[in-house]
Image: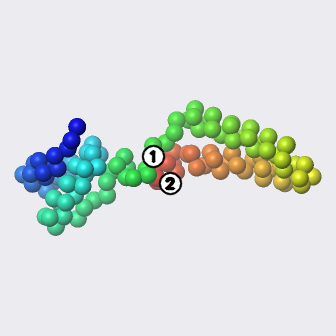
Amino acid sequence: MKIDTDQIKSNYELKDTSELLSLHESGSLSDEAYLVLESVLASRHVPIPKRPLEQVAGASKPLPLGLRIVITVTVIFVSFTAWQNIFKPLVGGGAILHAIFTILPPVFIWMKLSPRNAKKGE
């Protein structure tokens, strides 16, 4: 389906600025519609607000808890396997190195996958 930006622009130009700002905040527009809407707002010398989170490039929704658990358990397994088969024979063991290779990676992965970080778009 081809989007006719000229038709969208003429439709937006007929609306009040407050209606356009409400439409901008809704988060329901396509990228093309946002570009046209922002150009109409700019032509009216209205400050363009930030797009809602869903429309920000690179923003992601938080992963479900079950998927975060599966990913973290997989990282624990891979970290432990790497420790047992690669790093332990190379460095000769040691509790501190064991903690570094098996505990810290899953902790960092869990923190990265947490909903708090996903909302920031990290």
The x, y position of residue 67, in whole percent, is 57, 34
Q: Residue at x 89, y 55 (%)?
A: 91
Label whose residue precedes the other's in the sequence (1 or 2)? 1
Residue furthest to the left in view is: 14
Label 1 vs label 2: CA separation? Answer: 8 Å
Label 1 neighbour load within 10 Å: few <14, some 14-19, many 20+: some
The type of residue carrying mark 2 is: Glu
The x, y position of residue 110, in whole percent, is 62, 45
The x, y position of residue 90, in whole percent, is 89, 53
On the question of residue 98 being in view, the answer is: yes
| Element carrying mark 2 | loop
On the question of residue 16 being in view, the answer is: no
Quadrant in the picture for the N terminus: top left
Q: Residue at x 83, y 54 (%)?
A: 97
Q: Residue at x 68, y 37 (%)?
A: 74
Q: Nearer the viewer, residue 48 or 89?
A: 89
Q: Nearer the viewer, residue 24 or 6?
A: 6
Residue 28, by quadrant, is top left
Q: Which residue is mark 2?
A: 122
| Element carrying mark 1 | loop
The type of residue carrying mark 1 is: Ser
> Along the horizontal axis of the image, is 114 left or right of 75?
left
Q: Residue at x 16, y 67 (%)?
A: 45
Residue furthest to the right in view is: 92
Q: Which residue is mark 1?
A: 60
Residue furthest to the top in view is: 66
> Along the horizontal axis of the image, is 47 left or right of 113?
left
Residue furthest to the front in view is: 2
